[in-house]
Image (spheres, rainbow, N blue to C red):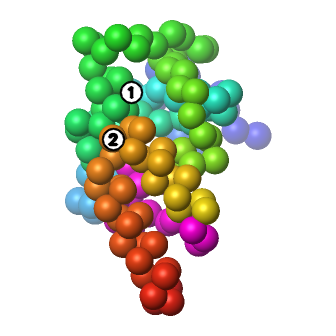
Amino acid sequence: MQPEPSAKGDADDRPGPSTTVTSTTAAKKLKDLAVCQNQQIILCVSEVNFYTSAQTLLGREPNSVLACMMRKTSPLQPYYTDKILTYYVNRSPECFKYILDYLLNGEKCTLPEGLIILRKIFVEAGFYELSELQSLLERKVLRFLRGEN
């Protein structure tokens, strides 16, 4: 049975060895994750909650609708759900999971096969003004039509 962690969340309360992180790439990833954890938000996309961070929405396409939502001057202001800033967007949750994957991974994101779903994602990317994602989708559709998958 594990002891209860202290309210402070001391490193001694965590399971695993107490050695420091030596990999510079691991250390950078952990710092990035800490920033994301501190900036956690919920995007409620037509009643489906996506947990992400402001940094994720701001990072890849800083002029997109999603990035602009994060600005203090945005007319769309968040509300709180369980002490987490929450934004409601009445759009397609089916497509949003791919949009979020793109925002996290860029061109390495996983996109589905099939022209209909790719078209739906393209329309949603247009709504969010994610022009680089739209270009990526156009290239994928062209490869699909040429039989190059």
Task: Please indicate, yes or no, whether residue 31 appears anywhere in the rendered image.
Answer: no
Q: Say if the magenta span includes residue 107.
A: yes
Q: Is residue 137 or residue 67 the one in the foreground? A: 137
Q: Amino acid at mark 2?
A: Glu
Residue at 29% in and 26% down: 68
**Image point (27%, 20%), residue name:** 71
Disc number for residue 38: 1
Give the class, few, some or many, for how many residues have Cα within 10 Å of label 1's Cα (few <14, many ≥20): few
Residue 118 visible here: yes
Q: Which mark is residue 129?
A: 2
- Main secondary structure type of the part rendered in magenta: helix
Distance (Cα) linking label 2 and label 1: 26 Å
| 144 sits to left or right of 136 | right
Q: Position of residue 51 (x, y in %)?
A: 54, 34
Decide whether residue 77 is among the magenta residues. no
Label 2: which secondary element: loop
Q: Quadrant of residue 5?
A: top right
Query: Looking at the picture, which amino acid does disc 1 mark?
Result: Asn
Span colored in magenta: 101-115
The residue lying toward the viewer, choosing from 140 and 21, is 140
* Residue 21, horizontal then vertical, whole percent: 32, 54
The crowding category of the residue bearing disc 2, from other C-alpha atoms within 10 Å (few below 14, some 14 to 19, many at least 20), is some
The secondary element bearing badge 1 is classed as: helix
